[in-house]
Image (cartoon, grey):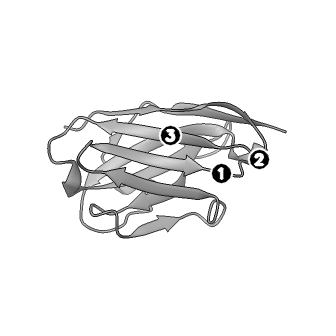
Amino acid sequence: QVHLVESGGGLVQAGGSLRLSCAASTRTFSSYVMGWFRQAPGREREFVAAVIWTGGSTDYADSVKGRFTISRDNAKNTLYLQMNSLKPEDTAVYYCAARRNMDILTMRTLYDYWGQGTQVTVSS
């Protein structure tokens, strides 16, 4: 069982930046592929970014490429999402997710563990 806790959300103006964190309660954090997803009101939860256990390979949704950066610190059992040049359409609840796996995963249904989410609101 893996317990995930997100933090770092908030209200920011368009063009601003936020850094989300996700703390994982497992001693085998490096065995998990980690992802960020988001869900806006009335919409399905969608993939944002993912990173393999080494941090050496990442994948991003087209909508965030060049603006968001996913990273992880296995020594601290923590996943990050640096979000720059934020847009109002980035407004959503952001969730981190985990699965014991070696490969990048972008499909929501493949992840086993989820955090409770953190709200990101971007004002225009």
| Quarter of the picture holding the N terminus | top left
Q: From mark 1 to mark 3, how far is it between C-alphas?
A: 11 Å
Which label was assigned to residue 15? 2
Residue 84 percent across, percent down from the top left: 65, 51
Indicate the secondary structure of the residue bearing disc 3. strand
Residue at 77 percent of width and 43 percent of height: 88
Q: In the rendered image of this protein, does residue 61 appear above or below residue 24?
A: below
Q: Is there any visible trace of residue 54 in the rendered image?
A: yes
Which label was assigned to residue 20? 3
Q: In the rendered image of this protein, does residue 1 appear above or below residue 28?
A: above
Along the line of sight, which residue is nearer the eye, 41 or 48? 48
In the image, what residue type sits under mark 2? Gly
Residue 48 percent across, percent down from the top left: 54, 55
Quarter-wise, where is residue 22 in the image? top left
Along the line of sight, which residue is nearer the eye, 37 or 13? 13
Residue 15 percent across, percent down from the top left: 77, 47
Mark 3 and mark 2 in contact? Answer it, CB < 8 Å. no
Q: Earlier in the sequence, mark 1 or mark 2?
A: 2
Indicate the secondary structure of the residue bearing disc 2. loop
Residue where numbered disc 1 is placed: 84
| Quarter of the picture holding the C terminus | top right
Q: Is there any visible trace of residue 111 in the rendered image?
A: no
In the image, what residue type sits under mark 3? Leu
Residue at 43 percent of width and 30 percent of height: 116
Q: Residues within 10 Å of mark 1 (few under 14, many from 20)?
A: some
Q: Earlier in the sequence, mark 3 or mark 2?
A: 2
Which label was assigned to residue 122? none
Mark 1 and mark 2 in contact? Answer it, CB < 8 Å. no
In the image, what residue type sits under mark 1? Asn
